[in-house]
Image (cartoon, rainbow, N blue to C red):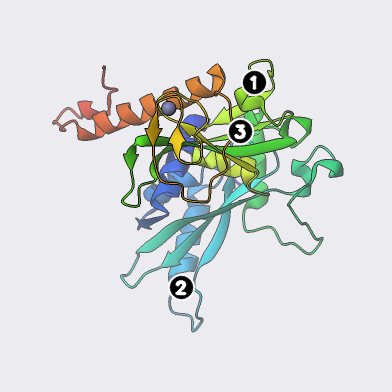
Amino acid sequence: MSIPSFKPTREAYLEALTELYQLRKKPISSYQEMQPYFPHLSQKQIELLLKTNRLAKHLDTSDKTMYFATPAVLIKNSYHVLSLTPIKEENQFTLSYSTHRRTPESYLSKEYIVGDVFTPEDPLPQYAKEAIDYAQNEWQDSLQKIDKHSKYFGSIEIQDPKNLTSLGHPKLKTRVYWKSNSQIAYKDEKVRDLYATCNSIEGGELHSAGRGSYAFYCTHCFTALALDRCNTCQIPFKDNFFRSAESGTLTQQVIKTIQASQSKAEKKDLSFQRPSNKEGSQKKPVKI
Ligand SMILES: [Zn+2]
């Protein structure tokens, strides 16, 4: 049994994984750079991964990429898959985000399995068991099985009709991922059963078996966009023929989720822009 060498909080781990997801690829050259993404592995295991991958560079195979599992943050008995590829320079690697996968044990019962196909021959990627056990041990309270509360799920594109693309379509401001036992939970205040997040890693876990429904809402007034305008803000835009129109206004819970996500992103931008000094105080949160 492996002994993990450090224990980030769920939030710190989620932040690291989200950053990798956004970058898609990241150059890596040391154990220290690998560590934030593999809290379930010991230093020895991570160094062995790098050594094995370094050796793979010299093998006469077309694909030298290796795949490894890393912990999930929301769905029980599931895991994310990252990949490591050696690059030309000695001791240089590319770490990439690959995907999220559930197991049959992620479901409360078979009746909730929609979209995922499992066969007994499906091999788990390396360290999947360690990743599943780690999440279970470290943030058990945040993990859920797929059950009636995940019967309906989807994405809400929050778009800005005041900020158009060169083709005249509203730009994407953010995306909300949700699940519920109600199809209209995100726009019906009477429905209390809703999980909503703007985080792409959590969203990936909610949607890894299928995309679910799509909806399009205005970032200024939080009402549903028509095909070619926001009727509330009275702003027209070009129909891209991909969207479906619906009516309604997002619930307070969804609006607060969007606002919290945007406020967090703005704070991150501010601390990133702040010039560094010798005391290293740029790591402190910036008060605004
Ligand atoms: Zn509007």
Q: Amino acid at mark 1?
A: Asp
Residue beneath label 1, please? 188
Tell me if mark 3 has few (under 14), some (14-19) or many (20+) residues whose alpha carbon lies within 10 angstroms of its own.
many
Give the left or right position of residue 121, taking residue 13 as reference.
right
Tell me if mark 1 has few (under 14), some (14-19) or many (20+) residues whose alpha carbon lies within 10 angstroms of its own.
some
Q: Secondary structure at mark 1?
A: loop
Which sits in the foreground, 93 or 104? 104
Which residue is situated farthest in the bottom direction here?
A: 60
Residue beneath label 3, please? 178
Tell which tag, 2 or 3, sits nearer the viewer.
3
Q: Secondary structure at mark 2?
A: helix
> Residue placed at 51% from the left, 46% from the top?
38
How many numbered discs, if any?
3
> Residue placed at 45% from the left, 57% from the top?
96
The CA distance from mark 1 to mark 2 is: 56 Å
Examine the rendering and report whether any part of residue 224 can be seen.
yes
Tell which tag, 1 or 2, sits nearer the viewer.
1
- Residue 226 location, x and y as percent? 51, 36
The CA distance from mark 2 to mark 3 is: 43 Å
Q: Secondary structure at mark 3?
A: strand
Give the left or right position of residue 43, taking residue 213 as reference.
left
